[in-house]
Every structure is written in structure tokens, then in C-alpha cells.
Image (cartoon, rainbow, N blue to C red):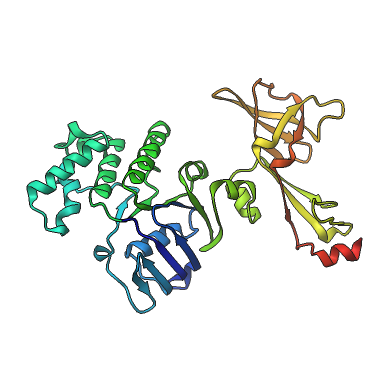
Amino acid sequence: MPDTVHLDQVSKTYPGGNQALDGVSLDVPPGCFFVLLGPSGSGKTTLLRCLAGIERISSGRIAIGDRLVADNRYHLPSERRELSMVFQDYALWPHLNARDNVAFALRRRRRPRPERQAEAVKTLELVGLGSLTLRYPNELSGGEQQRVALARALVAKTGLVLCDEPLSNLDADLRERMRVEIAMRVRDIGATTIYITHDQAEAFALADQLGVLEHGKLVQLGTPEQIYRDPATAFVARFTGLAVELPVRLLERNGSTFLADRDTLKALLAIRPAAVRLCAPDGNQHHLVGTVADVAFRDRGYEHAIQLSNRTRVTGVYAPQRAGRGEVVGLTFEADGCLVFPHVRSVTEAETREEA
């Protein structure tokens, strides 16, 4: 059965005062594919290691299923937590072949060796390595080693699978294929999965639910669609992909009207790449005018970087036709991809009424 995962105000402080996790609370429902997204140093690996029992938490509480596994006084060892891990560096035993690496995950269950090996071969066949069961890790490619690591995580049929940036060492094409492989296989066995990454495209592609970490704090939780369309902070918007950020003076906002005549009421306009369109630089269609600084072919069209007169650069501007470097172009923005965040301080309704 898949497990629920519950974290209540989990913090982790290392010797010297470095706080890696700061009061993280989180509930992952059974069978959910949950992705933790954040930059290097955000605490996502520490959180995964605390869940796995590799690290002790400083405060808070962690439960897996109906079992308490950690609080500030109690720590259940990793081997008793009934979970599996897929590591970034594969973590295969170099002296064991693929079959025995996978079968090793069943040793704690005291099943007979032939039975363990038969189950390992069956699982390797499931991930497309049925013909390579007797090869050693140094005889396998990076993608094949990652498939062995995945098979080892799946063979034990635990209720919880933890994935520590398992695709970061693979090339782009193989990374995409393995992303699909991992998503399919862990969903096939119905396990609850917690997967960490710093790659927002990977996170959006995999997640049922997504959490964003910043400096050890969980700053937003939701579906990929919710986080992309309605980011809670400028950091979340920035980390999930922007074409440009522009300081603006906020004059109006749908729902409530905000008048901002004072300099202290400036705001930040964050624009998604998909909301930017190229247009003619003359006439009244454009919102801004700039010069093409760079252009790159991308699959079905071209991606442009546009330099504005104030040295701000707009990146990721897609167009089906190529604009030449040095060409002056107009930019128009679609409202759905424009996000506004307070730049200095929030504008409250009371201030709005005051200025109105």
C-alpha cells in the first residue's frame, strides 16, 4: 500500500548554526508523485535525507504512514523506514552485477537467494534491461546504470520512493526518456513518490503536486498549473521561468483599484516568456521597442533575446520566423502571462481608499 508522508514544522540546523530547513510542514497523500523544486542550497536534499533517516531533524515531526519516524527525541533508522531511494550518482555496488545489485534490496526480507534473483531479473526486464542482468556497473552506460538503480528501488515494493535528482548526470535526450520511465514505473506500482530537482521543466512534467523551497522554507505548494499561473512570490515566478522583470508604478489592478502616486509604491512586473510576442516597431501595437541581441533555432521556430534601451534584456521570446541580430523590433505582452508583485511594500486596501 502507498504511504502518506506528514512533516510538521520540520527544521534542521547543522553545527555552526547553518539552518538548512526552517519549519517545513507538508502532507503528501498516498500514491502522489510529489516534486520538491528549488535552487542549490534551498534545503531540498536535506529534506529528502531527513525523510530517509540519513539525517536527524533538529525539531518538528515526521510520520510515514501511521508510524512516527522522527521528532526532536526519536529517530527511526533508515533500514526500518520501509522506503526506497534512487540516488543522483546511482550508488550501485561495483562488485555486483545488475541482477545482484537489484536483488540486494530484498536481502533484509530474508527471502531465499534464487527467489531474490528471480524477482530482480523480472524487475530488470520491466525497465528494459532483461538482456543485461549479468553485466557489472562499469560495463553499463549512465542511462543503463540509472535503470538498474530504478529497478532496485522498485523491486522491494515499498510504499514510498525517494528520488534525489536522479537525472542530473544524464544527457538531454536520455534525461527525457528516463523521466518518462521513472514516472511510468513508480505510478505502475502505486507508490508515493517524493522527487527533488532544480529543473523547473522536469518538475512541471512529473509532478501531481509541487512544492517550492527557498532558503529552507516551503514558500508555495500546489499543482504545477497553480504555481505557474499564480506564483506566491517574485522568487517563485523567477525560478519557474521569466522573460523579463520590469519595475513599474502600479496604477490599477483588476478587482481592487490601487493608485500609486508615491515612489514608495512601486511594483515589479514579471512576464512569462509565453506572453511575449514580436511585432512591428512602428504603429501602436507594441508595448516596448528593442533590438535583437541574439537568436537561436529551437525546434519549430526561433528564440530571441531582445535588448531594451535601458540595458534590460528580454529572453526566451519565441517566434516562428527569425528576426536578424541588430534588428529593431516591437514587443507586445499578453495579460495572462504578466504577474505583478509589490516591489517595496504591499499596497493595502486601506491605503487604496486613502489615496482614492
Horizontal placement of 74 versus 281: left or right?
left
Going 8% across and 50% down the picture, which residue do you hit? 113
Is residue 97 visible in this depiction of the protein?
no
Relative image position of residue 346 (x, y in whole percent): 76, 62
- Is 26 on the left or on the right of 228, as rendered? left
Residue plotted at (36% across, 40% down): 184
Where residue 26 appears, x then y in whole percent?
Answer: 48, 63
Pick the front one: 133 or 4: 4
Outermost residue toward the right? 356
Q: Is residue 338 above or below residue 34?
A: above
Asked if residue 271 lies left or right of residue 183, the reply is right
Q: Residue furthest bottom?
A: 73
Rendered view: 248 above or below 11: above
Please count the marks in the image. 0
- Image coords of residue 182 (percent x, y): 36, 42
Report the quarter where the N terminus lies.
bottom left
Quadrant of residue 194 within the rendered picture: bottom left
Query: In the figure, residue 158 lies in which quadrant?
Result: bottom left
Residue 265 seen: yes
From the viewer's side, name the closer residue of 355 and 303: 355
Name the residue rendered at 74%, 41% in the picture. 335
